[in-house]
Image (cartoon, coloured by chain):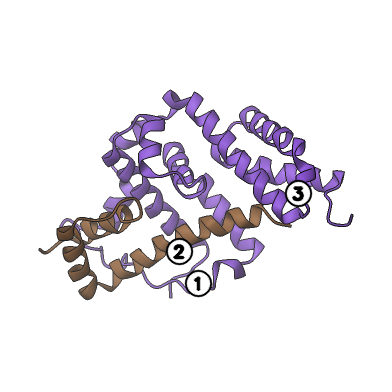
Chain colours: A brown, B purple
Amino acid sequence: MIITCKRATELLSQQLERPLHFGEKVSLKCHLLVCRGCTNFGSQISVLRELSREYQRQQGKD
Amino acid sequence: MSDQIDQAEIAELRQQMLKFAMLQLRDEQLAEDAVQEALLGALKNIEHFQQRAQVKTWVFGILKHKIVDVLRAQKRQLNLSELAEPNTMEQLMFDRREHWQSGEAPQAWHCPAASALSADFWQVFETCLTHLPEAQARLFMMREFVELEADEICQLHNISHSNLYVMLYRARIRLRECLTNKWFQEV
C-alpha cells in the first residue's frame, strides 16, 4: 500500500501513457494525499504535455 | 486575395517547419528532405485552402507524417545505451529510502496559461529540449509532439514498453528540472 516518492513519480509519468491498474491507482492516490512534492511533480509533468501542444501551435501560426 | 499565401510567407513557413523537423530529426539533410516533401505535397493541393491558418495546420500535419516516415526508415539508429547508465538525476532527487532529498521536493510552478508564455520562454523550452540525451529527446518528441501512442512508438523503435516508460520518465524529470532552474524559479 505504501509507495515511495520514486515509485509515485514513475506512476505519475506512466499515467500519461497507459491507464494505471486499480492497485496502482489506489496507492498513488494515497501517496499524493500526504505528499506535496509528488503532487507538484504530477501537475508539472502534465504542464509539460500542455507546453508541447502549445509549442506546436506556436510553430503553426504567425 | 489577401487570405492567400505569398512567396514570402511560404519562405517563413519553411523556416518554421525546418526548425520543427530539426528538433526531432537532429540532422539537417533529413530535416530539409522531410520539409521539402511536405511542402511539395501541400502546395499541390493549395487551391483547396482558403485561409492561412488552415494551410499551416495542414502542412504541419503532413510534416509530422514525413518525420515519422524518416524515423521509421532509420529505426535501428535509436541508441538505447542511455538506458544502461545509472541515472544521476534520480540519484540526486531521491534519498536511499527513495523519498525526496531535502530541498529537492518540487515546489509549485507559477505558470500562466501556456498560450500566455513569452517568446523568451519558448527559447528556454527549446534549449531544455536540445539538452536532453538524444534517445530521450526523440522518444519524448514522438510522444508529445508527433503524438504517437506508446504502442506505435514501441513498434517503430522495436523497444519494450517498460524501456519506453523509463526513457519518458527520465526525459520528463530532466525537462522539469531544466525549466524549473531556467524559468519557473522555485520560491
Q: CA distance from mark 2 to mark 1?
A: 9 Å
* Dots 2, 3 in contact, CB < 8 A: no
The crowd level at tag 1 (other Cα within 10 Å; few <14, some 14-19, many 20+) is few
The residue that appears at 40% across and 73% down in the rendered structure is B108
Question: Does residue A60 appear anywhere in the picture?
Answer: yes
Quadrant for the N terminus of chain B, please: bottom right
Between residues B8 and B134, which one lies in front from this camera angle? Answer: B8
Between residues B8 and B174, which one lies in front from this camera angle? Answer: B8
| Subunit that carries the residue with mark 1 | B
Q: Which residue is mark 2?
A: A47
The residue that appears at 56% across and 37% down in the rendered structure is B65
Q: Secondary structure at mark 1?
A: loop
Same chain shared by disc 2 and disc 3 = no
Residue B33: x and y, percent? 66, 29
What is the number of the mark on residue A15? none
> Please, is residue B104 above or below residue B5 in the view?
below
Question: In the shown orientation, is residue B56 left or right of residue A42?
Answer: right
Residue kind at label 2, given as amino acid type: Val
Q: Which residue is mark 3?
A: B49
* Dots 3, 1 in contact, CB < 8 A: no
The crowd level at tag 3 (other Cα within 10 Å; few <14, some 14-19, many 20+) is some
Q: CA distance from mark 2 to mark 3?
A: 33 Å
Quarter residue B40 falls in: top right
Quadrant for the C terminus of chain B, please: bottom left
Of circles 2 and 1, the one toward us is: 2
Between residues A15 and B50, which one lies in front from this camera angle? Answer: B50
What is the number of the mark on residue B111? 1
Of circles 3 and 1, the one toward us is: 3
